[in-house]
């Protein structure tokens, strides 16, 4: 006679192929859940109306990896992002709740920081859905060399007293994983779940006034005039009453002065009133600046000179502090740019991104400011860093192909084909009429990355032999 066992009260129970939760393992008791980083298409099954604004509508949602159920939740979903507001294929943001406790549901995907909202980017100008994730991942491969870390050890050690500094999930930018969204049983499209870009992603304690994280908001005169806090966003520190666009000098003079110290020095370097080479050690982590310039040049990120980057410091005061550059929002890279028509194309040998528009002939190009100063004055250091990263393989065809292979395996060709039917490339993308067609293939991505790398090799005399 077979021995019998008590029914488990934890873990999963296989009831003839129907997966059920044990009595003491009900998802309703969790406000924090983890799911593995997907190795196959992630599916989000949504029941609810299609939202038309960021406030959104009520929704019931279930997440699957392939056919494997991961979790279900209720909450709201709405539109996300500035350019998405007028685009045909919109970005979405899910704000999920534990239906029983009413608390926010925090979701940790693989090694990413936990998220209390889930952003699904449409990337309607980049129908490969790869550029943003690829560019930031290539940068991480670069910036980890040679220490293996993305930040000084002191930034991790800050958290030693509270949690032993276990913050290796800090990405110092965003990352992405593809997902299919199905609404009320119908396929909506392929999107990219993007990791949060909040203070924990940069090892920032937003209660510490020295932990300052800022992002320019299309600040066209940032390299020529005195610091103006209203054209910057301050994700950290948390300042009572602050919202993007507010004048920080009226809310917290210490944070404002600490930031003004850096930006006014950069303006002085740009206008010739200060010498970068002899003074940078008082203000800037040079490797972070070099790596930012290198990824900007390699990826042809024209929108990263007055807009898409982050600046941060863990020790900023009105009289001292070292700041770091980090890339952000990199979907307009590797052949995608706002100034191109749907049939436009970029010559990867055109010149330097970090040059004046009058030189590189970029229509409406952003002023390169401090990045041009560094590229011109720190040429030996840039050449040496490029050589080291090329020799290490962090900048290589192989680094690109490894990303494309792993990331592409998470996208179903059938689903992407249907996505292009649902959201044709002739539609309004939020930036121009129709996506830039020549750039819409992974083979193009690999080719332009190779060609641009070869051009930079030639400028700096690099040879692997």
Image (spheres, rainbow, N blue to C red):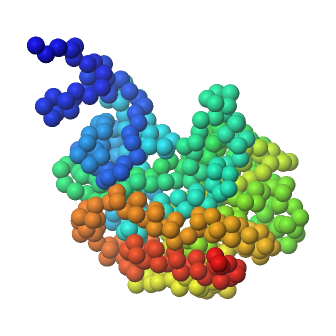
From the top left corner, tell me how far across and down residue 67 is, in percent. Answer: 23, 46
Residue in the picture at 81% in, 55% down:
283
Residue 230, placed above or below residue 377:
above
Residue 204, placed above or below residue 232:
above
From the top left corner, tell me how far across and down residue 300 is, in percent. Answer: 56, 74
The part of the image, by quadrant, that contains residue 226 is bottom right
In front of the other: 419 or 150 = 150
From the top left corner, tell me how far across and down residue 446 is, in percent. Answer: 46, 74
Which quarter of the figure is the N terminus placed in?
A: top left
From the top left corner, tell me how far across and down residue 188 is, in percent. Answer: 25, 57
Q: Which residue in the rendered view is the most extreme toward the front?
A: 1
In this rendering, does residue 337 appear at all? no
Relative to residue 406, is residue 60 drawn left or right?
Answer: left
Residue in the picture at 63% in, 54% down:
144
Residue in the picture at 83% in, 60% down:
280
The part of the image, by quadrant, that contains residue 278 is bottom right
């Amino acid at each position: 006679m077979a021995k019998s066992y008590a029914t488990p009260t934890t873990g999963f129970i296989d009831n003839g192929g129907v997966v059920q939760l044990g009595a003491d393992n009900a998802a309703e008791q969790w406000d924090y859940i983890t799911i593995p980083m997907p190795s196959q298409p992630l599916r989000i099954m949504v029941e609810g109306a299609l939202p038309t604004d960021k406030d959104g509508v009520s929704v019931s949602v279930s997440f699957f990896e392939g056919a494997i159920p991961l979790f279900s939740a209720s909450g709201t979903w709405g539109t996300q992002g500035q350019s998405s507001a007028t685009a045909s294929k919109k970005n979405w943001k899910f704000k999920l709740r534990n239906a029983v406790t009413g608390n926010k549901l925090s979701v940790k995907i693989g090694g990413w920081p936990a998220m209390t909202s889930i952003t699904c980017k449409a990337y309607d100008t980049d129908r490969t859905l790869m550029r943003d994730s690829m560019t930031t991942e290539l940068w991480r491969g670069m910036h980890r060399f040679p220490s293996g870390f993305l930040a000084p050890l002191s930034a991790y050690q800050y958290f030693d007293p509270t949690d032993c500094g276990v913050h290796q999930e800090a990405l110092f930018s965003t990352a992405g994983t593809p997902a299919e969204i199905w609404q009320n049983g119908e396929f909506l499209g392929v999107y990219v779940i993007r990791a949060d870009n909040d203070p924990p992603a940069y090892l920032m304690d937003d209660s510490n006034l020295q932990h300052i994280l800022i992002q320019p908001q299309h600040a066209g005169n940032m390299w020529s005039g005195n610091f103006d806090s209203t054209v910057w966003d301050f994700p950290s520190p948390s300042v009572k009453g602050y919202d993007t666009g507010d004048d920080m000098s009226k809310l917290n003079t210490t944070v404002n002065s600490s930031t003004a110290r850096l930006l006014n020095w950069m303006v002085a370097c740009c206008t010739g009133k200060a010498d970068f080479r002899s003074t940078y050690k008082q203000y800037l982590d040079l490797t972070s600046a070099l790596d930012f310039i290198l990824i900007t040049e390699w990826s042809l990120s024209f929108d990263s000179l007055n807009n898409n980057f982050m600046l941060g410091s863990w020790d900023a005061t009105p009289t001292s502090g070292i700041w770091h550059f980090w890339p952000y929002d990199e979907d307009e890279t590797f052949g995608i740019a706002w100034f191109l028509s749907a049939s436009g194309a970029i010559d990867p040998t055109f010149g330097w991104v970090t040059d004046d528009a009058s030189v590189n002939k970029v229509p409406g190009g952003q002023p390169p400011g401090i990045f041009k100063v560094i590229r011109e004055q720190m040429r030996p250091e840039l050449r040496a860093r490029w050589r080291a990263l090329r020799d290490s393989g962090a900048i290589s065809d192989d680094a690109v192909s490894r990303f494309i292979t792993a990331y592409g395996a998470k996208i179903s060709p059938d689903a992407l084909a249907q996505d292009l039917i649902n959201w044709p490339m002739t539609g309004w993308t939020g930036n121009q009429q129709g996506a830039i067609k020549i750039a819409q293939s992974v083979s193009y991505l690999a080719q332009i990355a190779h060609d641009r790398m070869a051009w930079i090799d030639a400028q700096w005399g690099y040879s692997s032999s």
